[in-house]
Amino acid sequence: MSGLLVTVEGASHLVRALQLLNTETSARCRAAVSESLDEAASEARSRVPVDTGELKATIRTEMMTSYPKGWLEVGYGTLRRRSRSTGKRKSRRKAPTLANTQPGVYAMVVEFGDPARNKPAEPFITPAIESVRPKNTARIRDALRGATVAAGGA
């Protein structure tokens, strides 16, 4: 499976700490992460370059069920000309096309560009995630602060 991977430093420690918290705090953190993911997806949809609208239609979020962890997916599902190709179709043209690429590859080509195809980068995922980062941090902090207040902490 190809796609964009964003690594958050310290996430494994946060996940472990959240596993030890009560269910109410975990639910608050899940809501905070879900809200941030929805905001990032909305921001990505507003930034994505639109030719046919197919790429924009594939932007979605997924949440884990057991603890507050989620991700943004782009380029999977409904890209008819790109996602469902088996790559076995013969083409008479010698110019490279995106028609026989694997799911998610087209989104990466749009995001990062492809010098071999003379396609400049048109980032939309990374700026969307970066624009939501401060709000996400504040949401998680507020959810955890609410837990310490409810537990009688400072």
Image: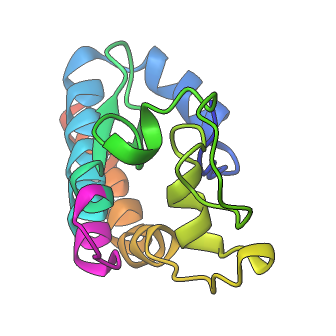
Q: Is residue 107 left or right of residue 117?
A: left
Q: Can residue 145 be seen?
A: yes
Residue shown at 57%/56% (left/top)?
A: 98
Asked if the stretch drawn in magenta spans residue 44, the answer is: yes
Residue 39, position as x, y percentages in the image: 22, 62
Image coordinates for residue 72, horizontal then vertical, percent = 40, 47
Determine which quarter of the picture holds residue 42.
bottom left
Residue sitting nearer the eye, 88 or 63? 88
- The magenta stretch spans which residues? 43-54
> Residue placed farthest to the right in the image?
116
Provide residue 77's location: percent of width, then percent of height. Answer: 32, 34
At horizontal 36% and vertical 61% (from top left) the residue drawn is: 136
Residue 60 versus residue 15 in the image, above or below:
below
| Residue 77 higher or lower than 124, as above or below | above
Name the outermost residue toward the front.
92
Q: In this picture, is 129 found above or below 62? A: below
Nearer to us in this view, 134 or 61: 61
| Most foreground residue, 97 or 5 | 97
The residue lying toward the viewer, choosing from 54 and 36, is: 54
Pinpoint residue 7: horizontal percent, then vertical percent: 67, 49
Q: Residue 109 vs residue 136: left or right?
A: right
| Image: 35 above or below 89 | below
Query: Residue at the spot x=39%, y=21% of the render?
Result: 67
Q: Quadrant of the N terminus?
A: top right
Picture quadrant of residue 144 = top left
How many numbered discs?
0
- In the image, 115: left or right of 129? right
Regarding residue 152, the answer to whether it shows in the image is no
